[in-house]
Amino acid sequence: MPATNRSQLSSFDADRVRQAVQQTVSGPLYSFCEYDTESFRPLYIDDRTIALYDSSDEMLEHFERIHTHVHMDFMQIELFRNTLFPTAERVEYIATSMDVLKLLRVYVGDEALLLALEPDEPVEPIVAVIKETVGWPPNQNS
């Protein structure tokens, strides 16, 4: 049985976004988390992901280890916007594809969503439904 939590970090309705994403993905949604520079909260973890760990404590420790590095995402946004591409108004998402999964990080101001997907999952439809559900703020990341 998948594990779910209610959103507590995001200023937008991350629970509604998760539901919209689950209806959009063509393959499995392995996990869906909300985070900012200080906190990280898994909102959905599917059975396949849970089965990879010996215990929920081990899984949460791994998720915490991931979070200790995601603050770099926000530093990357500044690097891209201020140094590398100063004409860009915002960074909307970053996708990292590996042989075992694809991580999609979508940024909404100072908050973000982290999704674990199949490596061949197209990200554009997911980003589009997130933008639509959130009501993409015109000044996000500015």
Image: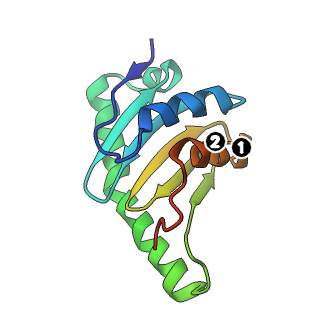
Up-down relation of residue 36 to residue 100 (above or below): below
**Direction from residue 142 to residue 117 in the image, left or right:** right
Residue depicted at 58% across the width and 31% down the height: 20
Q: Are marks 1 and 2 in contact (CB under 8 Å)?
A: yes
**Residue at 35%, 46% in the rendered image:** 10
Residue designated by label 1: 125
Numbered mark located on residue 20 in the image: none
Quarter of the rendering containing residue 86: bottom right
Q: Disc 2 designates what residue?
A: 129
In the image, what residue occupies the spot 48% across and 72% down?
A: 77
SS for callout 2: helix
Residue 81 spot, x, y in % from top left:
53, 80
Q: Position of residue 55 (x, y in %)?
A: 31, 22
Residue projecting furthest to the top: 1
Q: For residue 4, which quarter of the picture?
A: top left
Q: Which is more toward the observer, 99 or 1?
A: 1
Kind of residue indicated by mark 2: Val
Q: Residues within 10 Å of mark 1 (few under 14, many from 20)?
A: some
Q: Is residue 132 left or right of residue 62?
A: right
In this picture, is 113 found above or below 79?
above
Specify whether 29 is left or right of 41. Answer: right
Quadrant (top left, top right, bottom left, bottom right) of the N terminus: top left
Name the side, left or right, on which 3 lies relative to 61: right
**Who's the residue at 61% across and 55% down the image?**
95
Q: Quadrant of residue 122?
A: top right
Residue 87 visible from this viewpoint:
yes
Above/below status of 16 relative to 55: below
Where residue 8 appears, as percent x and y from the top left, is 28, 38
